Amino acid sequence: MSEGLAQWGPELFMTRAWERRRGLMPEDGAAGDVARGGFEPCLLALLRLSVGTGSGAEVTRGRLPRALARTGHLARAAELVCTITDELDQGEELLGLVKAAAAAGDLCGAQALAESIPLRQLRDQALVALVPEWARAGERDRAVAVAQEIRYPHNWGRAWALLAKAVVDTGDIDEALGFAARAEDEVSSYAVDGTEQVLALLVEVAFATGDHERAAVLADRVEEMTLLRGPTAWSKPRSLARVLAREVLDGDLDRLDALLRPPSGPAVGEGGALCGWVLGEEAAQDTVGEAGQAGPGLRPGLRPGRDESGGQGMDLDGGNLDESVVSLLSAGALLGASGLACVLDAVAESADQAVGLALAERAETLLETGDGRDHDILLRSVTLLLARQGCAERAMALADGLDPELRGGRQADVVAHLARSGDTAGAEALAYAIGDRRAQDRALVEVVRELARRGDTGRAEALVHSIDDRWAQGEALVAVARETARHGDPARAETLTRSIAYRASRARALVSLVELSEPSRARRLAAQAVALDGWAPVLEALERIAPRSVALVVDELTS
């Protein structure tokens, strides 16, 4: 592990290393005199001069083509992307352009581009992404038409589920239920990768319509599908954890408790029942014999299937599980430490104290009685959940049990979450108690951020002086300046940026003020940031105040 990574945390560690390499502010502070009038031509001229420093930038993929798409230059962006020779890479970049253009409101352009993607699977993915966008734009008939254009069956369920979610968010329950039913039909008898995600989305739709009984039925299917996939399912999008989090927030911990409880009793029960699933006739013939050997033939209850796109799927025969699956699951609890950690992370910000403490109790029990797999993942999640609930002493006690190299960073995490819970005074006191100075500085930065976010910018500014590391002082001031501007004092915010020692940090602070300023001031601040650290950090902010700037940068890079 890199020196200081655990103490600073990944986010601050990488940012600190980069900005320190960029160097300190020049002593003359000349950037403050740039483009005082805030005129756009002056900003564009300065931007053109700065591009030479970034001539190695990638223009055929990533942020620049997508910025072009967001600023009305979708055709130019597509032209650049189409120079990529690898068909898969090109298709993925075109998919990114479709999403960027749709997010910017250019649905017609995004639709035309989606239909031109050569690879059919990626074209399908682009169309699936456009379905809810058309619905949110009030073009429901167009959304339905796009969903019907999707070629491969394994994409149909997701498209209709996304449409149902978009429609239910508008309050149209009846039509949302119709789309949800269609999505459920598509995944009811033919399971492919992604079925769990579709069903989890339908659980959310059912909750939104107030049909908790239907939500429970769908949640049962998510659980069954996850168990059929086996233990590797936790390495994929965690649909079961998403469903569990939704139920937990609704006050229902029954399913969570059942999954945390190790299966008991024989794998094969009376009548051929396997751990809650009833075997079909075919499966009953293949149960474990007296010698403990599985019978011959096809896996009981499962038949291999293939969709029209050539993808491998499974036809479900009444939800039956074969003996090999059950014996695999019976080794321990069906929901392990990693899965429970995912649930804790999903509810940490929104759970009330009763739910939060109930989950923490279960997590601590699993840490004590589990087999040790993913122990550190769950330990981190429960520590932060406790801090978020205001239980600082319990959280710090868990952190104290860590290796000394990791302890300070985890304590800083606790301080950050305690501050977000509203106890900024307690968080500040805990920060001073951290023994490692780097972790202490990081913790104080988090307290400053939260104080500023809550509008107590005076106290936040005073606390900055308690931070020992010079770069970390600037990081804290970035937050104070931004929130000072947000709370109505842009002049004071701009003055604060002048106290930031590192040029890249000051440029980032100026960019954060650009987004909160009226156009003339925003252009002046953007010009100062360009003068300090080049065009790259400012590009996204320029999309709003000077949309032509993105095309200018690309033209300069490709000329």
Image (cartoon, helix red, strand yellow):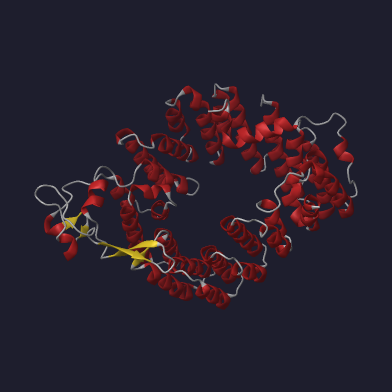
- In the image, residue 148 lies at what x, y percent? 50, 75
- In the image, residue 192 lies at what x, y percent? 39, 61
Q: Quadrant of residue 448?
A: top right
Q: Is residue 279 left or right of residue 290?
A: right
Q: Is residue 462 in view from this perspective?
A: no
Q: Residue at x 71, y 30 (%)?
A: 20
- In the image, residue 506 lies at what x, y percent? 76, 37
- Asked whether 102 or 78 is in front, the reply is 78
**Relative height, residue 292 to residue 203 (above, below):** above
Q: Residue at x 79, y 42 (%)?
A: 529
- Asked whether 140 or 258 is in front, the reply is 140
Residue that extends furthest to the left in the rendered view of this protein: 290
Q: Quadrant of residue 24?
A: top right
- In the image, residue 42 lies at what x, y percent? 89, 50
Q: Residue at x 80, y 35 (%)?
A: 498
Q: Is residue 483 in view from this perspective?
A: yes
Q: Is residue 521 left or right of residue 243?
A: right
Q: Residue at x 57, y 71 (%)?
A: 135
- Asked whether 78 or 503 is in front, the reply is 78
**Relative height, residue 317 to residue 434 (above, below):** below
Q: How many marks?
A: 0
